[in-house]
Amino acid sequence: MQTLQVDLGERSYPIYIGAGLLDRAECIVPHLAGRQVAVVTNETVAPLYLKRLSQTLAGHELTPIVLPDGEVFKHWETLQKVFDGLLEARHDRRTTLIALGGGVVGDMAGFAAACYQRGVDFIQIPTTLLSQVDSSVGGKTGINHPLGKNMIGAFYQPKAVVIDTATLATLPERELSAGLAEVIKYGLICDESFLGWLETHMAALRALDAAALTEAIARSCAAKARVVGVDERESGVRATLNLGHTFGHAIETHMGYGAWLHGEAVAAGSVMALEMSRRLGWLGEAERDRGIRLLQHAGLPVVPPAQMSADDFLGHMAVDKKVLGGRLRLVLLRRLGEAVVTGDFPHEALQATLDTDYRTLMEQISH
Amino acid sequence: MQTLQVDLGERSYPIYIGAGLLDRAECIVPHLAGRQVAVVTNETVAPLYLKRLSQTLAGHELTPIVLPDGEVFKHWETLQKVFDGLLEARHDRRTTLIALGGGVVGDMAGFAAACYQRGVDFIQIPTTLLSQVDSSVGGKTGINHPLGKNMIGAFYQPKAVVIDTATLATLPERELSAGLAEVIKYGLICDESFLGWLETHMAALRALDAAALTEAIARSCAAKARVVGVDERESGVRATLNLGHTFGHAIETHMGYGAWLHGEAVAAGSVMALEMSRRLGWLGEAERDRGIRLLQHAGLPVVPPAQMSADDFLGHMAVDKKVLGGRLRLVLLRRLGEAVVTGDFPHEALQATLDTDYRTLMEQISH
């Protein structure tokens, strides 16, 4: 088991990473506020892991709250089911919510914990690669609004993150790839040597090699913990974690939540950020293509939806949270391994990036 | 104009109190984060004060968001209208929400500010006595759930509270009385000399004497600011501000939100707390009756609803936020001017308090 620490003063918390942690009470029980525990999970994960977690928490007053599975359900009506479950079982302020599932479960359980009786404790037990390397760490919680993703939420830190790498054995291959999009992101924005490691180990990761997974997850979480430790509320460097996300959110919103997996949209969005960075002269073609190939080797889509026009993108991006004072800001790469958040670019570069024929570009790259 | 300060480190903020502050840009504009402003108000207050506030904020990009009026609308569906309004007008993270109205508007606008894009600035401009002396100060925000009042919310502090005492001229008499319930509460829990002042000035307050109102509001806000400054998240002394509220919330929930005004339920609940404190031997009959008479002179109900049984109260109180580890805790009075939060009382004292025939008690007191 590896243990990392997210340093946030009195809101600091540990991240435990290892195979079989679901059965290790010593990783979970010390972080419970009292006897009451509500396990928030979904219809896919509950049959796989709820019983094991319940056994690990034997002796506690446990309320399972099983939500429908999917990003399309990440809205208020589903969140309300969490509040219903807590109130019907009379959970008080000393209850602890445990998020058992992927990013949607974690975002909703975390936001529910932030709001229930104005704030109760919660623990993240992420069961997808994407949530293990990204959304479970850092305290971003929330739900979607018909007019925008994650528009309603809170910064609210968990008391612990417990990552059982063995849960990835039940993860569909498509979702494993989606998680790899965020893993690759860390290499692109802050760790060029990690990019090299990933190029060497991509096949092992996709084959669920335990040691490779643990290493990739630990390096990703360490990168995220470093960034969150210096910028919890995203006033600066934390925004670099959103590489590919502004373009990606536009894809997710336009296509309807759930049609593209978040990681898939981030992958296509990262391709657009790579291309725009090249157009600004910050990356060469070879560097751009190195990033794109790594995403391809992870089994990810690298071409945005054909039916989305530049204007479609611009419309969705105008409500993005990184718009400040009317100016659109994007995460771009100064070089591989170094991201910047900037609104200081000519509109023509963005327009050209949106107008690019990515299908043709990919054909050129693969030749 | 009087200025008080709520001391909460980097979350400190001023409270301005005076007649005509709605027209004083210097109290409001310095606290805006950027050009975008959303004024959240309701159908009753908008025709009275929205235009004046808009003139005071001339030069800003102002989005009015007008909600239906009343506690019955303090739920998610109404809150959603705030998010709709913000997103349709493309408000970004530098927007500022202004709550213009009573406690329901303040609670919802504050919670919306806490959640919109994971937190934006907000300013309280309370227009009812109740919100001026209580809910606008201290950062409690939230909405109701069918199973309990204020069960979903956040601790989220405003950047400023601007109290224009002249707005009380348009307040219905019943709501003025409801506000006086909270004013009297401060005397009961922490300031016996204020009780004496209130006995002398109750008639002046109900006649809207400007000097008396300013004094009563400033003393109430100062008491609240003191308590909040030492216990923002209600882990201790802040809970004493809930004198009468556990009983009162049971009344509000049982009768349906809005049937009893919050202050009216608090008044009847305070009578029950006074009676229980007498049963525990902490107050004499004369002290209990002094508190009850002051509530009566403020025009408030002092008898709980005849149709509510002791079991009705106990059922509702079991989901109260002051239940910790299964134990019901109540705010009671050790003496006039000194409150305690305690679960250390014989159940018989509570049962007898709930079984008391308050109608008959009032007849005895008035003789």
Image (cartoon, coloured by chain):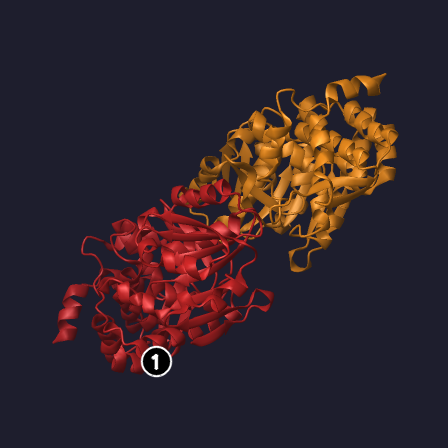
Chain colours: A red, B orange
Q: Is residue A159 above or below residue B114?
A: below
Q: Amino acid at mark 1?
A: Phe
Residue A306 position within the rendered picture, expressed as x and y whole percent measured from the top left: 18, 56
Residue A246 position within the rendered picture, expressed as x and y whole percent measured from the top left: 35, 59
**What residue lies at 33% left-to-right and 71% top-to-bottom?**
A183
Disc 1 target residue: A194
Q: Quadrant of residue B105?
A: top right
Q: Is residue A259 above or below residue B241?
A: below
Of A287 and A126, the residue lying toward us: A126
Left/right placement of residue B294 relative to residue A280 reads right
Question: How packed is label 1: few (under 14 Cα within 10 Å), some, or many (20 or more)?
Answer: many
Of B347 and A361, the residue lying toward us: B347
Of A178 and B203, the residue lying toward us: A178
Residue B163 position within the rendered picture, expressed as x and y whole percent measured from the top left: 69, 39
User: Can residue A322 be seen in this snapshot?
Assistant: no
Residue A26 position within the rendered picture, expressed as x and y whole percent measured from the top left: 49, 68
Q: Please, what secondary structure does the residue beneath circle 1 have?
A: helix
